[in-house]
């Protein structure tokens, strides 16, 4: 039986890697993107639906057409400096758009949700080892907007039983070994980098690996194991050095 996964922001850097990993794991990634910061030519692994999370009818159309079994939500504005200059833009796009998506998921009975958050929710905490239990004190509108979405997910979990996994990224960079997918600013691959993963009710944390290796591991195992499909193997957070190596272009 085909299992569709709705991937918002699937035309972006992390989202496109997620789509590749999902396809290789046997799922059908359905990319939903407004292409404001994404690239349509990065959508290579499943159907593409252009739309805006601020338009609820666009979201409902995709749920009705594909009946996804889970949502992976990467779509967001993510420039810290811009968020300080235009906070309203970030609260509207990141929070209101996410609320539309979360409400639509519940309304359509799609109760498994993976959210791409950010380490910016922790704020300025130098010389501190961070994990999913660390205090969150965002100091910019970007981090605050992502923290607000985490709160929304917690409320929807309590009210409706929505299952959610939250990933707080530190840095993601590099490209796939075939150079088919890469971000727009680097040709270096960084391996490894850590991030926090907050699983509602049973927190866990694990490693972020560059490019496809990270996507294949955490997207497939977390989507299948951390949500309704089984247990949650938990790993402790450890801070490790970033080793840069040259990627083949």
Image (tube, rainbow, N blue to C red):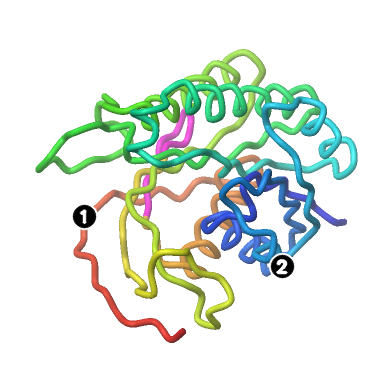
Measured from the top left, where is residue 245 in percent x and y?
29, 79
The image shows residue 230 at horizontal and vertical percentages of 61, 46
The spot of residue 184 in percent (x, y) is 47, 64
The kind of secondary structure element at disc 2 is loop
Quarter of the image with the N terminus is: bottom right
80, 205: nearer the viewer: 80
Task: Name which residue lies at 67% across and 41% down.
Answer: 71
Mark 2 sits on what residue?
Answer: 44
> What residue is at 23 percent from the left and 66 percent from the top?
242
Instruction: Please say if 6 is above or below 163.
Output: below
Q: Nearer the viewer, residue 210 or 56?
A: 56
Using a 10 Å C-alpha cutoff, classify the residue at mark 1 as few (fewer than 14 neighbours), some (14 to 19) or many (20 or more): some
From the top left corner, tell me how far across and down residue 35 is, in percent: 65, 49
Residue at far bottom of view: 248
Q: Give the magenta part as a residue range.
A: 198-206
Residue marked by disc 1:
239
Task: Please state which of the two labelled residues, at mark 2 or mark 1, is closer to the viewer.
Answer: 2
Q: Residue at x 77, y 33 (%)?
A: 59
Viewer-side residue, 229 vs 3: 3
Give the structural element (helix, strand or loop) at label 1: loop
| 243 horizontally vs 63: left or right | left
Badge 2 crowding class, 10 Å Cα cut-off, few under 14, some 14 to 19, many 20 or more, is some
Q: Is residue 77 magenta?
A: no
Which mark is first along the chain, 1 or 2? 2
């Amino acid at each position: 039986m085909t299992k569709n996964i709705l991937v918002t922001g699937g035309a972006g850097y992390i989202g496109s890697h997620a789509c590749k990993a999902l396809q290789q794991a046997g799922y059908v990634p359905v990319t939903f993107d407004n292409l404001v910061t994404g690239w349509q030519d990065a959508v290579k692994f499943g159907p593409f639906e252009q739309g805006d999370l601020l338009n609820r009818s666009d979201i409902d159309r995709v749920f009705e057409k594909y009946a996804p079994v889970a949502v992976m939500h990467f779509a967001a504005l993510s420039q810290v400096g811009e968020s300080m200059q235009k906070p309203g833009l970030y609260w509207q796009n990141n929070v209101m758009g996410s609320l539309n998506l979360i409400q639509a998921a519940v309304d359509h009975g799609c109760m498994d949700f993976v959210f791409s958050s950010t380490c910016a929710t922790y704020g300025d905490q130098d010389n501190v080892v961070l994990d999913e239990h660390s205090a969150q004190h965002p100091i910019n509108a970007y981090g605050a907007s992502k923290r607000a979405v985490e709160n929304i997910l917690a409320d929807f979990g309590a009210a409706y039983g929505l299952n959610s996994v939250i990933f707080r990224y530190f840095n993601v960079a590099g490209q796939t070994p075939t150079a088919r997918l890469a971000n727009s600013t680097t040709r270096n691959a960084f391996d490894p980098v850590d991030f926090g993963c907050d699983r509602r009710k049973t927190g866990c944390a694990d490693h972020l690996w560059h490019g496809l290796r990270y996507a294949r591991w955490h997207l497939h195992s977390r989507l299948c194991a951390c949500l309704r499909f089984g247990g949650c193997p938990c790993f402790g957070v450890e801070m490790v050095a970033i080793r840069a190596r040259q990627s083949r272009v």
